[in-house]
Amino acid sequence: MSEPPVITADSRPIVAAKARLRWDARTSRHLLLYPERGLILNPTAADVIQLCTGEHTVGAIVDRLAEKYAPQPRETVEREVLAFLVNMADRGLIRDQDD
Amino acid sequence: MTEEPRPYTLVAELTYRCPLRCVYCSNPRDWAQHADALGTDDWLRVFREAEALGVVQLNLTGGEPLLRDDLEQLVDGARALDLYTNLITSGIPLTRERLARLKSLGLDNVQVSIQDVTAAGSERIAGHRSFERKLEVARWVKGLGMPLTINVVLHRENLDHVADVIALAESLHADRLELANTQYLGWALANRRMLLPTRAQLDAAREVARQARRRLRGRMEVLFVTPDYYAEVPKACMDGWGRRFLVVAPDGLVLPCHAAHTLPGLTFDNARERPLADIWRDSAAFDAFRGEAWMPEPCRSCDRRTIDFGGCRCQAYHLTGDAGATDPACSLAPAHALIEAARAEALTPDAGVIYRAAHVADGA
């Protein structure tokens, strides 16, 4: 508990205990809820968060999404997924399972 | 207003009863006149109706929500509706066994209030010996693997301890620390001479919090809520009247904010008598300060009117006598001199203290 979280391709992200994903029928979006706040996730972000179970590495998540979002280049998907996950980790909404 | 208002959060004030007597309590000063009128089934229906309206966040609060012996049923019902369920508590009275039960029912987060970093400082504010017990409760929360928010209301007597507050929250492994400066309404307004800090105190504490936020990024969320008395612009109170929040008071009144029933001339409906959706969509009180038609100048032509919504209606009323006035916290408000006078007073402290009345109302 001394270093800020670092998310790399080898990290195995898991949604933090304080956050919970919920489907919102009104907006047809997933919400990531946490104390007194919530994020409305776009479909791609929701795909990423749903894979943050602590089982998959970021690399595996990128593979999965690059397949789903073909013909998007894998590098583009990787860049976006990493940026999103780093942001989520900074907010304490995901953490690395191995930390 | 183009977008239809949607309540995202239901603030369920389960009871105004509380073992603590905090000098800044946000409950109405005549709280003892408001009985706990909603039974378990009433609350469960309120939760269902709120969820149907769009609510996804539920704050179980009070007074002290643990004084309801049906809290377990309420948490169970809330989670069946997939509401993010947050228990906002003094931690008193609670046993580890009851907390474990609440966890097993799906309680999402526990927010424990702490008044200061020493037992003496805490008890002076809370009028009750509770400090050590609160720390124990916070440790139970983390010991059970639940997320923990520590909430500290800031004022002139503890603002200089913010670094110690942060260290205490870290030692408790809190997930989130809310450093919330006092809002000067209700008991806090009565105790303003005692509580309002100086600008120097505030600036120093804000800087401490800013550095901690950076250092603890990703591990502990550190929120610092600036008091509007020193902000020059009003806060977006409740994200705007009747826009994002629903409050249901212990007596069943459905309110846009927890103090709205202190405003004269507004009649609020009761959740026992009218469906929540009707109250939200079609009641004079919820419409009273929605949109911009009610706004006076300088709000009406101000660029910030869609940001701060004219500020806090309760503050406007309790300081100027007019709930429709521009919030005096705004430096452009005609009544801003009232805020400047209060700040000037803060330079000459007054130790007088008024505790929340200890009288306990007959609970339902």
Image (cartoon, helix red, strand yellow):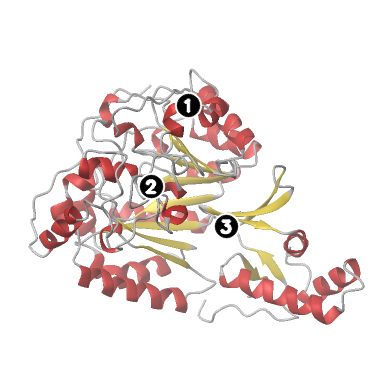
Q: Amino acid at mark 1?
A: Ser
- Which residue is drawn at the image coordinates 17% and 53% (left, top)? B338
Q: Which mark is residue A18?
A: 3
Q: Which residue is mark 2?
A: B91
Q: Given this view, does label 2 or label 3 mark the residue nearer the observer?
A: 3
Q: Amino acid at mark 3?
A: Lys
Helix or strand or loop: what does disc 3 sit on? loop
Q: Are marks 2 and 1 on the same chain?
A: yes
Q: Which residue is mark 1?
A: B283
- Mark 2–mark 1 Cα distance, whole angstroms, equals 36 Å
Mark 2 near mark 1, Cβ–Cβ under 8 Å?
no
- Which residue is drawn at the image coordinates 62% and 72% (left, top)? A87
- Rendered-image quadrant of the N terminus of chain B: top right
Chain assignment, label 1: B
Image height check: is B304 above or below B105? below
Q: Amino acid at mark 2?
A: Gly
Mark 2 near mark 3, Cβ–Cβ under 8 Å?
no
Image height check: is A34 above or below B22? below
